[in-house]
Image (spheres, coloured by chain):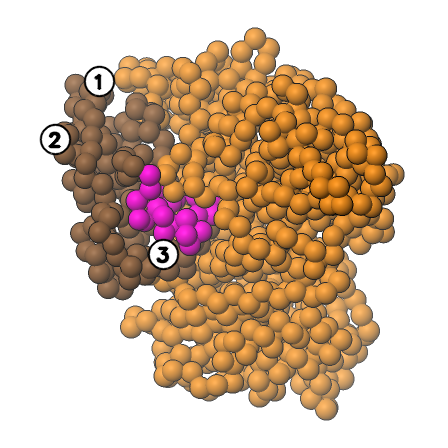
Amino acid sequence: MIELQINGETRQLDIEPEMPLLWALRNELGLTGTKFGCGIAACGACTVHINGQAVRSCVTPVSAVQNTNIRTIEGLSANGLNPVQLAWIQHQVPQCGYCQSGMIMAVSALLESNPDPDEQAIASSISNVCRCGTYPRVSKAIADLVASRSDTPFVDATAEANV
Amino acid sequence: MSISRRRFLLGATVVGGGLLLGYAFTRPSRQSLANRDYAEDGQTFLTTWLRIDPDNIVTVIVPHSEMGQGVLTSLPMMAADELDADWANVRVEQAPATDLFANGVLVKGFAASMGFTAPAFLNRTMDFVTLKAAEIMNMQITGGSSSVRFTGEMGMRAAGAAAREMLIKAAAEEWSVPVAEITARNSRVYHESSGRSLTFGELASAAARFEPSRTPVLKRPDQFTLMGTSVPRVDIPAKVDGTAQFGIDAMPEGMLYAAVMTSPVFGGLLQSVGNVDAVMQQRGVVRVVELDDAVAVVADNYWRASKALAMLQPVFSSTDSDNRSSSDIFADYESALDSGEKNKDVHAGNTEQALADATEVLSASYRVPFLAHAAMEPMNCTILFRDGHADVWTGTQDNLGIRGRVASIAGMKENDVTVHPFYLGGGFGRRLPMSTNTIDQATLIAQQFDVPVQTLWSREEDTRQDYYRPAVTSRFRAGFDNNGQLVAWENAYIGKNEPAEAAHIAYNIPNQKIDYVDSATHVPFGAWRSVAHSQHTFFLESFTDELAWNRQQDPLQFRLAMLADKPRHARVLREAAAKAGWGTAVPAGRARGIALQESFGSIVAEVAEISLTADGQVRVEKVTCAIDCGRVVHPDNAASQVESGIIYGLTAAMYGQISIEQGRVKESNFHDYEMLHLAESPEIEVILLESDGAAIGGLGEPATPPISAAVSNALYALTGQRIRELPLKNYRFLPPPVERGAVDA
């Protein structure tokens, strides 16, 4: 039995330890906000937070994330939308939208750990692939978030406090 | 039709209950059919595409798929504006995949754009004819940059205007006042002089007694209240919190997952499958399914299915193409072009004579490789066959077409197939109904079960079993007369595809001879964003640039001199150039290139400003794009589409290459079929231009074609190296520039 802490809830799953977290989330738990894009950690569509760090769940076996706090897009914000999601709406970032869960998870994790990232930090952290080419708007939204940083956390920690 | 299914797709934007004010903009009887078959709980369709509920909610039914282009916002805006509806109380639904909602306007739009007699607006005969065509063709196609310019302009606006007239007539009867004294705004009808008013919802059932006009009076642009504004897109909230549902997210009760491997050589057949016994012992595996050209493992979890699939040992038949490679295909192209047997595309003047008389003749040969679409959502389709009925859950660019396809493969009647629409995780032409290998497999696999089965391709399968943008070779000769005027343009290329005008030039050159030669390959081909424009604009605008440099003329001025009779083309060039600082000094180590193309009814000029990275690769710093699309419905989304088109085309220019080796596609995933990333994404400035009286143009595709030539032309300006074959990743560029102006004779 595999025990996972997902979005502040404890979930028991009778699955293989080597099953990638992505497929446990999608097929076993029905958390479909996390997307399958490549299966080799090359596109970032499957990005989730493990203890606040952005991790590509398609190559992360569930055995490696037991006793961690796993957060998916569904648990990103306990109440309403977090500042990244609001900025995404303000800048009308998504087009087809498929990569955006992963994009938002990656940006949230980056800004939570580094509120004032330079170009290099953004380039290396946000390597998610978007085929619609929303990159110019992603850049503007990040710049806005950095410039207008409020006290609202990018990642809501209340859920984890209950674990 | 179940409301809950629609809500499943569009979330909170869907509200049930009320009146279907359906306007059959094709023929009135569709409205009564809509009311009979689709109205629930007192709803009224005033037209097929508009429904008004008693609580004054207006619902616009959109016969297109949302694949990122914003169609669920732009089309409702057009209907709501003409209707004078209150945008806050407008809801959106995707049309059900049934005959009633076949998109006849689309057929009409394409017929008109292809040069048939332009139909009188909402002409009854034409509408009837095109509706029949849509039903026969099962059309709910989303493609050809057509949604706003055809469905919106010819369908949604008329639907809104006709419904408004019906509501006003109903109020006139109710109050016994002349129609001319009644006005409408914000989903209410007013008789100002008596101070009376009624909501659309209160009037809808009375209004539905009237036949919708086939020639409603449309607003002038200065009367628009919604068109021309950037209302927030209705699909975006669900796309930032993970609730947006794509085909891959369908999870009907009891669903199994199929992982598939198709013959890696196109055309190969499955001969045998080894290791089945061991695979059947794997946890969760339910069945191994053998198809003619593929093998699938069906399991209770996709990871288990794909892990088991990797253990199988399928043997595929040998084919005539087993030893074919990209170099063989390009060699065939050369032979075909050498053969002399060409098909006529455009002939004007006497090009051979003009070339013979020319004081200087320049020639060049260009080529581009095959490309895959690489939509972010891997191809998938979920189907349940039960009790003689099929339910299909998938994201497609033509829900009606997929209904027909599944019915035809399964040997069922179309009415026994229900297609449930979803958001598309990218379309780009890959999810068009002529490219159905995933759907076909999903049908054949699911037929063997009485539970839903989701057939889901790996990224590798997605890359290797696509319908590819064709590789093309294109040869040019151009001749200057003794005054230095460009008088002859000769072009011969491989394979004529859609749209037919892709290899045609806007420039005024008196002698033109454009021909094509067919050279079949075993590689399946399909529509790729902007279709044949994406290859030909690279060729045409690169070669034009060569000619300008040869004449030692500024590439912008060289083009403008040949566009005296094309003011819209000249204008986009000038606007893009001016905003890009064309003719002003560039920062050290940078250069600019320009390119122009008209496609899908819009005219686009792009200026790329580039530099080189330390390891000699191209870095695109900035792209300035001017686009004249006639009229802009949603400026912010228009800009979004242009940005998107540029990034898509730039990715192809920089990295796009599908290579054939031993009959199969060599590339497999994003590590070897590379994509542009945020860090390489240029700053993009979009200039939206309108032209009074011009037909509205498309926006989903037209920005894609010019970018490869704009970047390549900038590279020449910077390095003196002329690129005649993409992608750019295969080169290393070295500043400083070598001698410019040399063209291989």
Q: Look at the numbered disc 2 and give the secondary structure of its residue.
A: loop
Residue reaching furthest to the front: B194
The picture's colour for chain B is orange
Provide the residue span drawn in magenta: A80-103
What's the residue at 38%, 69% (across, down)? Answer: B619
Find residue A40 and report its horizontal and vertical position in percent. Answer: 30, 41
Q: Is residue B263 visible?
A: no
* Count of numbered marks: 3
Chain rendered brown: A
Numbered tag placed on residue A141 in the rendering: 3
Q: Nearer the viewer, mark 1 or mark 2?
A: 2
Find residue B113 and report its horizontal and vertical position in percent. Answer: 75, 53
- In the depicted structure, whether residue B371 falls above or below residue A163: below
Amino acid tagged 1: Asp
Q: Do labels 3 and 1 share a chain?
A: yes
Q: Mark 2 points at which residue?
A: A67
What's the residue at 55%, 41% (across, down)? Answer: B88
Amino acid tagged 2: Asn
Q: Name the residue under label 1.
A: A14
Residue reaching furthest to the top: B387
Q: Look at the numbered disc 1 and give the secondary structure of its residue.
A: loop
Does B127 lie within the magenta span?
no
Find residue B272 and report its horizontal and vertical position in percent. Answer: 43, 22
- In the depicted structure, whether residue B214 falls above or below residue B599: above
- Whether tag 3 and tag 1 are in contact, CB under 8 A, the answer is no
Q: Which of marks 2 and 3 is in front?
A: 3
Q: Which of marks 3 and 1 is in front?
A: 3
What's the residue at 18%, 43% (across, down)? Answer: A52
Does A90 lie within the magenta span?
yes
Q: Earlier in the sequence, mark 3 or mark 1?
A: 1
Q: Earlier in the sequence, mark 1 or mark 2?
A: 1
